[in-house]
Image (spheres, coloured by chain):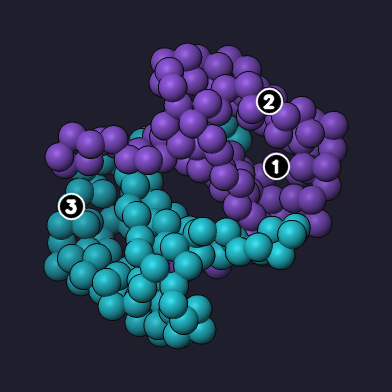
Chain colours: A cyan, B purple
């Protein structure tokens, strides 16, 4: 069983500043969350017509189960990472959690 | 290197019908996409206040690189899976593609 936290970051005011902060400060905080089994980020490409998607970065964090996710986010490290989001996510961010179904 | 396709499905008109179609028809089509290295789906939980998030299902499809993703989506199997989306995604769906950065 796997439980997933997806964080959808919308386009920030200053993408370069967002990227610099994410790499230097946020990701290093997030990797410390206890029970984290996987953590990736994907920055959606610009569409065929040159338009930017509403989402700027899709972060995927994996945990063994719902309890591990709750414990991880409730830990001091999880709290620090969650509180850090407001410091750079100038476009807003949505956190989604749920059980993973694996097809491949 | 890994390239990711994220499909964000918004709340459908009939969640039970969406789920039944997704499992019986759509996922079996999507697993046939050539070059697919990973494919999962996550259904976000209801929030602490009981409200449903805008997103109903987050699908994550992984490919070796951008060329593999383009070839996979451009294949007959990829085309069939993409055309199938309109048949059940009554709330709409957003497709996002980009390179993956792995932290954990």
In this rendering, would A88 be left or right of B75?
A: left
For the question of whether residue B32 can be seen, the reply is no
Asked if marks 2 and 1 fall on the same chain, the answer is yes
Element assignment for label 3: helix
> What chain is tagged by disc 1?
B
User: Which residue is tagged 3?
Assistant: A71
**Alpha-carbon distance for marks 2 and 1?**
17 Å
Residue B38 at x, y = what percent?
61, 43
User: Which residue is tagged 1?
Assistant: B36
For the question of whether residue A80 can be seen, the reply is yes
Residue A101 at x, y = what percent?
46, 32
- Relative to A1, residue A71 above or below: below
- Density class for disc 3 (Cα within 10 Å; few <14, some 14-19, many ≥20) is some
Which is more toward the observer, A68 or B58?
B58
Asked if marks 3 and 2 fall on the same chain, the answer is no
Q: Residue at x 18, y 52 (%)?
A: A71
User: Which residue is tagged 2?
Assistant: B84
């Amino acid at each position: 069983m796997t439980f997933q936290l997806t964080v959808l970051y919308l386009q920030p005011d200053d993408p370069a500043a967002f990227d610099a902060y994410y790499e230097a400060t946020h990701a290093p905080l997030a990797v410390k969350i206890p029970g984290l089994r996987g953590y990736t980020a994907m920055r959606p490409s610009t569409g065929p017509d040159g338009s930017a998607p509403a989402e700027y970065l899709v972060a995927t964090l994996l945990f063994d189960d719902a309890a591990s996710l709750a414990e991880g986010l409730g830990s001091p490290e999880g709290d620090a990472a969650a509180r850090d989001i407001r410091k750079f996510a100038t476009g807003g961010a949505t956190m989604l959690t749920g059980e993973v179904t694996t097809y491949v």
